[in-house]
Image (spheres, rainbow, N blue to C red):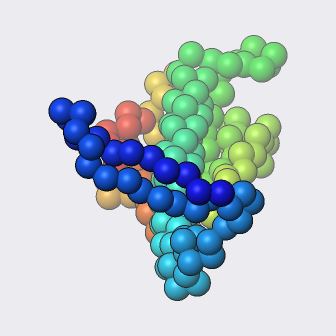
Amino acid sequence: MRVESCVTNSNNEYVGKFFREIEPFSFNVSLQAGYSLVEITLVGAFVALLLSLVTLNLFHFQHSSQLSATVNTFLADYKQQQIKAMFGDTSGTGALSNYGIYLGGSSYTEFQNAYGTSNFPVSLPTGIQVSTTSSNSQILFLKGSGEISGFTSGKNTVVLTDTVAGTKETVTFNKYGVVTSVN
């Protein structure tokens, strides 16, 4: 089938005829476009690189937020133990008691009077470690005042470490039990 069409310019003057053949349902293979194997491989490698960078950044963010949440939980427990010693959480005994925190590697334990009695262990998330410069790995708040028993200057820090990401947070306190810095 031959189709003729006239082409005119803007003044409607005859310019010429174009002829073309129309063959229904036939495709000219030379006009088909596609991607070469090299182009597909390069795009795939680029996408894989971007995904790996995003994954690594999200992994780091997860660990930094996990350490931050652990520090906040520890500080809340630390202050709660001090408040119990100051104002008395008698637990039905009717008498004020000393309260404290024992620090041990991958957990810490809240206790009443002395470590080993009325314990409440708190497990830290995987990869988080706790250590201290305090003697006996514990912080004991005196009943009534909330001061730290046996306080020694220079031995007043607790360090929470994320062993996977290699980051750490140091909590420093004074003899009154007040947290002076977290960094």
In this view of the protein, can residue 29 be seen by the observer?
A: yes
Count of picture labels: 0
State left or right for residue 54 relative to residue 93: left
In this view of the protein, can residue 85 be seen by the observer?
A: no
Where residue 153 sits: x, y (%)?
A: 32, 53
Residue at horizontal 70%, vertical 40%?
Answer: 111
User: In this rendering, is residue 131 above or below 34?
Assistant: above
Is 47 in front, or is 96?
47
User: In this rendering, is residue 102 above or below 133?
Assistant: above
State left or right for residue 58 relative to residue 104: left
Residue at horizontal 76%, vertical 40%?
Answer: 120
Where residue 176 sits: x, y (%)?
A: 38, 34
Is 77 in front, or is 90?
77
Residue 37 found in image quarter: bottom right
Residue extending farthest to the front is 14
Residue extending farthest to the left is 11
Where does the N terminus fall, quadrant-wise? bottom right
Residue at horizontal 71%, vertical 65%?
Answer: 26
Residue at horizontal 49%, vertical 50%?
Answer: 4
User: In this rendering, is residue 156 above or below 111?
Assistant: below
Where residue 16 sits: x, y (%)?
A: 31, 52
Is 77 in front, or is 41?
41
Where residue 164 sits: x, y (%)?
A: 56, 69
